[in-house]
Amino acid sequence: MGRKETRKIVHIKYIKIMAKKTTSKTKASKSILNSKSLDFLRAYLNNASPTGFESEGQKLWLDYIKPYTDDYFTDNYGTAVAVINPKADFKVVIEAHADEISWFVHYITNDGFIYLRRNGGSDHMIAPSKRVNIHTEKGIVKAVFGWPAIHVRDASKEEPPSLKNIFLDCGCSTKKEIEELGIHVGCVITYEDEFMVLNDRYYVGRALDNRVGGFMIAEVARLIKESKTKLPFGLYITNSVQEEVGLRGAEMITHTIKPNVAIITDVCHDTQSPMMNKIASGDLACGKGPVLTYGPAVQNNLLKLIIAAAVNKKIPFQRSAVSRATGTDTDAFAYSIGGVPSALISLPLRYMHTTVESVHKEDVENVIKLIFETLKSIKNNHDFKYNKK
Ligand SMILES: [Zn+2]
């Protein structure tokens, strides 16, 4: 046996040992999600919930969360709130946003094409050749984003997709035919793309931003119920509308609830995939745990409580910093009704506002665990002030 072979065998043995270790580790960390919760996640993501038109999604969400909560209400614009201990004076919010980015029909041409406006930060770059659903009173009408063939384009002056040139084709040749299908200016458009699991590791789909957040806060309610945890305060599990157009739903509902504390969950950018810039966006990775944000809108004593919960329960987490606002519903809660102690627990996500948004399964579970464990450490009338009397 030559030296080289010996080395090879040693190497193979090492790999086997490592493989064993990995298997036992996987067994130890049992998933907190069950088949019912995953069925809900799939149905919830596959249903469209465009900004301003979230009611179908909110219905699915309320149906799922009702058995785990004591009461619920909705507001005039569609934000849904499920409540545990509705009679308690001290109110804690856990929040996500229910809406997904979409498009509006803006201009129908006489020869049967449709130009669009954004509803939220929809990405013109990814539009060409996508299949879409146009939501009409008569139901869904199918259409495609057309694009001139590579053969007929002038390679020396390729025009990138923009709102000026992307258009929908729904198989009609006149404006009248389009109108007969039930399509009019103001109809909302979403992509067809649905939920899938990638390599048993990533949840992938359209608009995980931020309906995966709605899923996670609903799972927190389930854990509270199933573990028979008694919270010493009222818990307001809030699924806000209209985040994608400027935190509007959260702005509205914070005045209705008047919470004492708010913990918000939303997605943030993973920066490990090609063309991401760590100097501009920080070093954040899918699979390395929830992201905790430092910034003026985040109340530091609440943040400390979240970090303590993570450390105590050995939940991995990452840190991120923002110079001003967080750009999430956290800001709406923080800067309302005299200042509500607020913090943000983010889920790292790849390819935001595309149809293949991806999040790591373990991060989803760890966000759920971290919110759950943090809630258990909040006391009734918890005082988060920096300088106490
Ligand atoms: Zn978004």
Image: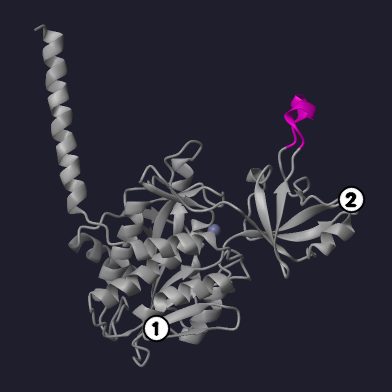
Mark 2 sits on what residue? 111
- For label 2, the crowd category at 10 Å Cα-Cα, with few meaning under 14, some 14 to 19 and many 20 or more, is few
Q: In percent of the image, x 36 and y 81: which residue is there?
A: 69
Identify the residue under disc 1. 83
Q: Does the residue labelled 1 lie within 8 Å of ligand 1?
A: no
Residue located 55% across and 63% down the image: 47
Q: Is residue 375 magenta?
A: no
User: Relative to residue 100, is residue 19 drawn left or right?
Assistant: left
Query: Was residue 154 drawn as part of the magenta stretch in this picture?
Result: yes
- Residue 21, image x, y percentages: 15, 40
Residue segment shown in magenta = 148-159
Left or right of 139, for residue 283? left
Residue in the picture at 15% in, 31% down: 16
**Residue placed at 45% from the left, 39% from the top?**
273
Instruction: Work out whether residue 160 or residue 126 is closer to the camera in this orientation and state it.
Output: 126
Can residue 92 be seen in this snapshot? no
Q: Is residue 98 visible to the viewer in this orientation of the structure? A: yes
